[in-house]
Image (spheres, helix red, strand yellow):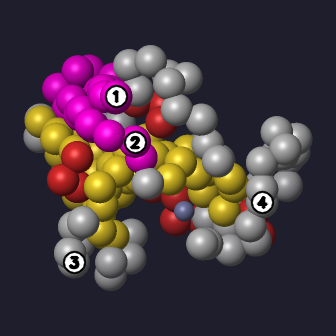
């Protein structure tokens, strides 16, 4: 199984072979700020299963993780652990087939926006896993 996606303008493309390690919706403040959205729905793939092309800009949201956005259209695309970069998180919204992957849980619901009601039946974790 392969998954593919890209940014709004098409300059950044990615392709993953193999299934993701996990698919989560993160409600933490860093994800809210980094995506400029209320939460970050992302899949995490093993770096060895993942290819990406196109120019990105990077911003560190913690000492451990860089957030990468398309250098042209600015779409937030990837969360990249720095050391070692064994895994990569990618926004579910960038999938070419947007419903090809489904989240398996919510994390950092302690930072969830008050106007979001979660009723999808998925497990909810107050902090990270
Ligand atoms: Zn772009
Ligand atoms: Zn987060």
The earlier-in-sequence mark between 1 and 2 is: 1
The residue to which callout 1 is attached is 1
The earlier-in-sequence mark between 2 and 3 is: 2
CA gap, disc 4 and disc 2 = 22 Å
At horizontal 78% and vertical 56% (from top left) the residue drawn is 123
* Mark 2: secondary structure: loop
Query: On the rendered structure, is 33 left or right of 110?
Result: left
Q: Nearer the viewer, mark 1 or mark 3?
A: 1
Image vertical order of residue 108 relative to residue 34, above or below: below
The earlier-in-sequence mark between 4 and 2 is: 2
Q: Does residue 27 appear anywhere in the picture?
A: no
Range of magenta residues: 1-20
* Mark 3: secondary structure: loop
CA gap, disc 4 and disc 1 = 28 Å
In contact (CB < 8 Å): disc 1 and disc 2? yes
Tell me if mark 2 has few (under 14), some (14-19) or many (20+) residues whose alpha carbon lies within 10 angstroms of its own. Answer: some
Front-most of 34 and 90? 90
At horizontal 74% and vertical 67% (from top left) the residue drawn is 125
Q: Is residue 18 magenta?
A: yes
Residue 66 percent location from the top left of the image:
29, 65
Residue 48 percent location from the top left of the image:
18, 53
In contact (CB < 8 Å): disc 2 and disc 3? no
The residue to which callout 4 is attached is 124
* Mark 4: secondary structure: loop
The residue to which callout 3 is attached is 83
Residue 14 percent location from the top left of the image:
23, 34
Residue 116 percent location from the top left of the image:
82, 46
């Amino acid at each position: 199984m392969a998954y593919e996606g890209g940014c709004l303008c098409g300059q950044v493309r990615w392709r993953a072979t193999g299934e993701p390690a996990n698919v989560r919706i993160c409600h933490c403040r860093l994800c809210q700020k980094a995506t400029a959205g209320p939460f970050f729905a992302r899949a995490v793939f093993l770096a060895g299963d993942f290819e990406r092309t196109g120019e990105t800009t990077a911003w560190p949201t913690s000492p451990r993780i860089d957030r990468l956005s398309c250098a042209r259209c600015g779409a937030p695309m990837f969360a990249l652990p720095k050391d070692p970069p064994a895994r990569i998180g990618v926004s579910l919204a960038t999938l070419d087939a947007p419903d090809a992957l489904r989240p398996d849980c919510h994390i950092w619901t302690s930072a969830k926006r008050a106007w979001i009601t979660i009723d999808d039946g998925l497990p909810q974790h107050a902090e990270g896993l």
